[in-house]
Amino acid sequence: MDTDIARNLHAVQSTLPEGVALVAVSKFHPADSLRAAYEAGQRIFGESRVQELVAKQAALPADIEWHFIGHLQTNKVKQIVPFISLIHSIDSPHLLDEVERCAARCGRTVDCLLQLHIAEEETKFGFSPDECRDYLASGAWRALSHVRLRGVMGMATLTDDENTVREEFESLHRFFGEIKASYFADDEKFSEISMGMSHDYRIALTCGTTMVRVGTLIFGERNY
Ligand SMILES: *Cc1c(COP(=O)(O)O)cnc(C)c1O
């Protein structure tokens, strides 16, 4: 079991070019599975539920970089802000304001990605490109001194049609380039495009991803 995780992890890592970070998505998997990946060298773990993340963070080594990748309710932000390394899933100005408020209290600056809705499915969270443009144009984010915008995140439609997935990833890559040029040209830290999961990360690699979020290929199927 543990040797499988180490082997799976190294198999995924070996497909990633330099400069692409691997977020090991460990949601629903027990702490022992994360420890196996940790012992195999993995340091970045992605979780999507606050309770689960808080429990794992307390149980596992302190040098893990925890990323939050799921829908984040504003009333739970304060539980993760003390230790979180990157929140991938900022999907409203209100949520960003709450991260700012909690981070200021903790004396931290929290790295965040803007989640864009790029899929055909209605259910996915995220800003539409126009909502995101409007928000950035408003300039409200410039006043947030405890939040650092680092880039964008998106999820493609769940489909076997590779062309659809590729078009969605390319549109996120283009959108990143557009807002980078308009608002973050002088900010070298605005550099991340989080896209690609187990079934589509290889497509994301051809579309400019800088961060892939891979769970199943490393840890196996989840038991929900
Ligand atoms: C669960 C999840 C992943 C990982 O999915 P796998 O198919 O197991 O690789 C990636 N990103 C988000 C936002 C997720 O919720």
Image (cartoon, rainbow, N blue to C red):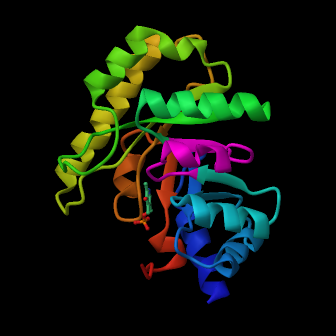
Q: In this rendering, does residue 19 appear at all?
A: no
Q: Residue at x 19, y 50 (%)?
A: 121
Position of 224 with respect to 147 (left or right) is: left
Q: In this rendering, does residue 40 appear at all?
A: yes
Q: Quadrant of the C terminus?
A: bottom left
Q: Quadrant of the N terminus?
A: bottom right
Q: Residue at x 40, y 56 (%)?
A: 201
- On the image, the x and y values in percent for residue 175 come to 34, 26
What's drawn in magenta, residue-wise? Answer: 68-88
Nearer-the-camera pick, 61 or 174: 61
Is residue 75 highlighted in magenta? yes
Is residue 82 highlighted in magenta? yes
Position of 97 with respect to 129 (left or right) is: right
Position of 40 with respect to 182 (left or right) is: right
Nearer-the-camera pick, 206 or 87: 87
Quick one: which residue is furthest to the bottom in this view?
Answer: 1
Instruction: Residue 61: name its quadrant.
Output: bottom right
Instruction: Residue 13: name its quadrant.
Output: bottom right
Nearer-the-camera pick, 116 or 174: 116
Q: Residue at x 63, y 27 (%)?
A: 147
Q: Residue at x 57, y 58 (%)?
A: 50
- On the image, the x and y values in percent for residue 78 come to 65, 44
Quick one: which residue is furthest to the right in this view?
Answer: 62
Ligand 1 quadrant in view: bottom left
- On the image, the x and y values in percent for residue 52 come to 60, 67
Count how many numbered circles sit on residues in the image.
0
